[in-house]
Image (cartoon, rainbow, N blue to C red):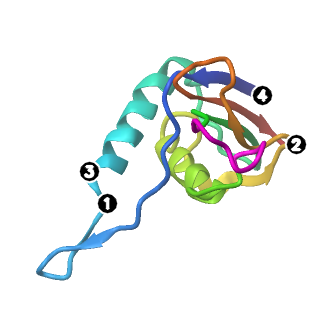
């Protein structure tokens, strides 16, 4: 099975959990809001049965290019793995049962500049291996 969709949302990285005064850790509100938005947008692509076997994930994060670019590719922070972590956590219970099922990343997975003048988006392809 193959699930393919585009999320019209600006990519955001997974922020580190923060400790409160009682040493309890909490995910920052911005990360929680992003994950909720991704869940909502991806829910219309939800398969009848959640994917539960080995998976290959191909994901392209399209970022708004800065006015002055140092590089032709977005070789700047935030890191690709932080973007990927936020997306994978958000798709738990929507596309797959657990993000631990992702065993491979597909060719083309990466960060790109959205040169079409958009506000950024995320392209996702999930395939069963």
The answer to whether the residue labelled 1 contacts the one labelled 4, judged by CB atoms less than 8 Å apart, is no
Q: Quadrant of the N terminus?
A: top right
The answer to whether the residue labelled 2 contacts the one labelled 4, judged by CB atoms less than 8 Å apart, is no
Q: Which residue is mark 1?
A: 27
> Residue 90: image x %, image y %?
47, 43
Check disc 4: other Cα within 10 Å, few if <14, some if 14-19, many if 20+. few
Check disc 3: other Cα within 10 Å, few if <14, some if 14-19, many if 20+. few
Q: Which circle's residue, 1 or 4, is located before the other in the chain? A: 4
Q: Secondary structure at mark 1?
A: loop
Q: Which residue is mark 3?
A: 29
Mark 4 and mark 3: Cα distance apart in space: 34 Å
Q: Which circle's residue, 3 or 2, is located before the other in the chain? A: 3
With 21 as the anchor, is 113 left or right in this view?
right
The answer to whether the residue labelled 2 contacts the one labelled 1, judged by CB atoms less than 8 Å apart, is no
What residue is rendered at 62% in x and 41% in y?
68
With 14 as the anchor, is 80 left or right in this view?
right
Mark 1 and mark 4: Cα distance apart in space: 32 Å
Q: Which circle's residue, 2 or 1, is located before the other in the chain? A: 1
Question: Which image quarter: residue 61?
Answer: top right
Nearer to the camera, 107 or 50: 107
């Amino acid at each position: 099975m193959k699930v393919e969709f585009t999320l019209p949302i600006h990519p955001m990285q997974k922020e580190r959990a923060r400790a409160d005064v009682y040493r309890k850790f909490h995910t920052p509100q911005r990360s929680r809001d992003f994950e909720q938005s991704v869940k909502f947008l991806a829910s219309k692509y939800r398969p009848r049965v959640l994917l539960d076997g080995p998976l290959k994930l191909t994901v392209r994060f399209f970022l708004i290019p800065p006015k002055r670019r140092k590089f032709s590719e977005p070789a700047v922070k935030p890191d690709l793995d932080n973007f990927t972590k936020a997306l994978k956590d958000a798709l738990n219970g929507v596309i797959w049962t657990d993000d631990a099922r992702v065993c491979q990343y597909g060719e083309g997975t990466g960060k790109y500049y959205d040169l079409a003048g958009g506000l950024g988006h995320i392209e996702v392809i999930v395939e069963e291996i």
